[in-house]
Image (tube, coloured by chain):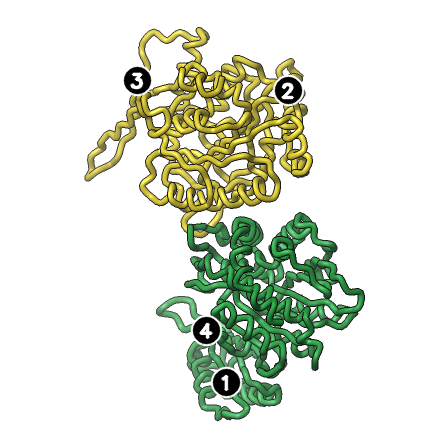
Amino acid sequence: MTAGCAMKSSWLEKNTFHYSEFNDLDRLVEEKQRKNLKISLCLPTLNEEKTIAKEILIVKSELMTRYPLLDEIVVIDSESTDKTREIARSFGADVYKATEILPDLEAFKGKGENLWKALYVTKGDIIVYIDADIKNIHHRFVYALLGPLILFDKIKYVKAFYDRPIAIGKSKIRPTGGGRVTELVVRPLFSLFFPELTQILQPLSGEYAGFREIFEAIPFPIGYGVETSMILDIYEKWGLDVIAQVDLDRRIHRNQDTRALGKMAFVILMTFINRKIRLGLIDIKEDLSNEMIQYNLIKDEYKPDIFQIEGHERPPIIEIPAYRKKFK
Amino acid sequence: MDSYLDNLPAFVDTIKSIKETIITNIVLIGQIPAPTFKEKRRTSVFMERLADFRVDECTTDGYRNPIGIIKGTSETRPPIFVVAHLDTIWGTDIDHYYTIRSDSMTGAGVTENSIGVGVLVSLPEIFRRLNLSFESDIVLAGVIQSLGRGNLRGIRHLLKTWSTPIRGAVCIESYELGRLNYYADGMIRCEVDCNISTTNGWEHKFKPNAILILNEVINQILKLRLPQRPRSRVIIGKISGGFKHGVIAYDAKLGFEIQSNSDKMVKSIFNNIKDIIEGISHEYEVELKLKTLSNINAARIKYNHPLVKSTVEVMKKLDLTPISEPSESELSIFLSRKVPAVTLGITRGENHQHINATAEIEPMFKGIAQIIGVIMAIDSGVCDEE
């Protein structure tokens, strides 16, 4: 066994949990109150009218009304054109358009932007981020992420992993699949450059929670790269021991086609390489292109479909004066 | 009785105040596929939710029907049963994930019977919110194997093995608000299978066509003279068969139900149909198999039974118009065991029994209030008088 393997098994054993270890909600509430913690749930949205109501009402019922674990549910929306905001409001969430938060700053559109801006409007010492497109939402998605943060002082950031059946068509479920970008892009990259991080089983999962002191001190790419950069930055600043991961069992999500995943992979690669350059770990002699080029066959002719990524990144929000004024 | 009747309209608002919890129960239980005979996972979640709501006793009977018992204040009063069937008409490969909107819920099985089951497990919390306690124990039972070939096995077993008298019962169906069932017709549900041998042999000069054979069966059933009293009918409900357009059908299947408010008449019609099938089988030299899938006996309480009268009062107090038809549900098993019972629906909707069934949220709160009104009526003794 190599040294890397020995270290791996040790972290995996210590910092990997199953959601059922945290289903004593009375205990979590008691410990939360003893530590005088406030907890916020943030749902970033873009046209999620089919799933948003279910997420809000289940979490609100179980973790606010029945067990006072959460103090607020906040929806940060990227200009949805469907009824996402209206529905979320009708089920009792605090709803914001991302553009209305810190309006003096240049506006960007993306999941990372919503997560970053959530830090300004939420009140919690702990913030839980959950994607708004989970078809089989269960309150374990929230309490299981909170469990290690509330019960173990050393843990500052918790990431979800799960089985990933995918929904195909309108009414059928395929039993296995998903996680292609993780296996084809992120895991090879981690294996090459940060072997320790391969222990994080699903680095791209959209469900994670952490203390404000962590999130406010790291930059947020505005788009898909936010999950990758978050792990790299937390690892870089605080090490692997502040991170934990929790098995949430099954998560049903929408299947994305290969082209969409290609774009996602492009953004993640870009984020990763930029991080490596910034850390001085690699040196690339020329600037990276910011265009992902895919081809479509249109009337016997291949035409390029160019997807441009600006690669904007928000600085640690602690550096924003309005934030410091509000929280410090 | 009037005192609690007067409280019912106010109950609606209190019930509505915990709509998140009620819908959560509907979603968490309803999203678990539970085709008849495969209700195990749904049963587990049903039990977990009841335990989570701190119901006094959570258990399963010998047939694995999950049951929760809320203890009453009286040592001597028999229990009141509230039941909803757990099984659904949809298979495990169907997407059971629901879409919730401000005013509606959509998804496979939402009206058959996810809302009924979700409301059943919400009752302990609703009672707490309404500050209600009862003299009788309240037995909350999710019964398995009700639909189709299940033939109400779950409820049959539960009542057969229940050792004490039962004071009265409310059966809950998701759909449709306003229904008030208090009688069940006698019924036999059958299937006829027609199979033509695919091997070439001397016995058929011309191969018969299974679909045409069943067509002949239908024609002869339609020729039967059915009496208006006792009210009787044969419903041809399902047919399938054949392989492709240009090939004679070797297999075909016909599903039908005989219904009457007289068990004797059901039996008599069944025998007539059996004769028809045997005759056609003989004449056409084909294999025709008649199978009985399920059956129930006719049973009823009268319209002027105090339980029915009280239920009508409860519904009227909530501005609901009662509509009565015979029911084939768990009700018939209670009635056949001389337990006064009614079946009530919870809400309205559309595409009932379709994959995209949709149920309205708002009417649900009145639907739940009426169930509580009827439980209170039974607890006040309306079923004790006869």
Judge whether residue B385 can be spotted in this image.
Answer: yes
Percent position of residue A310, x then y? 31, 21
Percent position of residue A132, x then y? 45, 38
Q: CA distance from mark 3 to mark 2?
A: 40 Å
Q: What's the amino acid at mark 1?
A: Arg
Q: CA distance from mark 2 to mark 4?
A: 65 Å
The hue of chain B in the figure is: green
Percent position of residue A127, x then y? 52, 28
- Badge 2 vs badge 4, beta-carbon distance below 8 Å: no
- Badge 3 vs badge 4, beta-carbon distance below 8 Å: no
Q: Are marks 3 and 2 on the same chain?
A: yes
Element marked by disc 1: strand
Q: Are marks 1 and 4 on the same chain?
A: yes
Mark 1 or mark 4, earlier in chain: 1
Chain to which the residue tagged by mark 4 belongs = B
Chain to which the residue tagged by mark 1 belongs = B
From this view, report whether residue B115 is shown above or below residue A206: below
Left or right of B55, for residue B120: left
Q: Nearer the viewer, residue A91 or A264?
A: A91
Nearer the camera: disc 2 or disc 4 = 2
Q: Is disc 2 surrounded by few (<14), some (14 to 19) or many (20+) residues within 10 Å? A: few
Tell me the residue that label 3 is attached to. Answer: A289
Tell me the residue that label 4 is attached to. Answer: B239
Tell me the residue that label 1 is attached to. Answer: B233
Q: Is disc 1 surrounded by few (<14), some (14 to 19) or many (20+) residues within 10 Å? A: many
Tell me the residue that label 2 is attached to. Answer: A154
Q: Is disc 3 surrounded by few (<14), some (14 to 19) or many (20+) residues within 10 Å? A: few
From this view, report whether residue B183 is shown above or below residue B111: below
Chain to which the residue tagged by mark 2 belongs = A
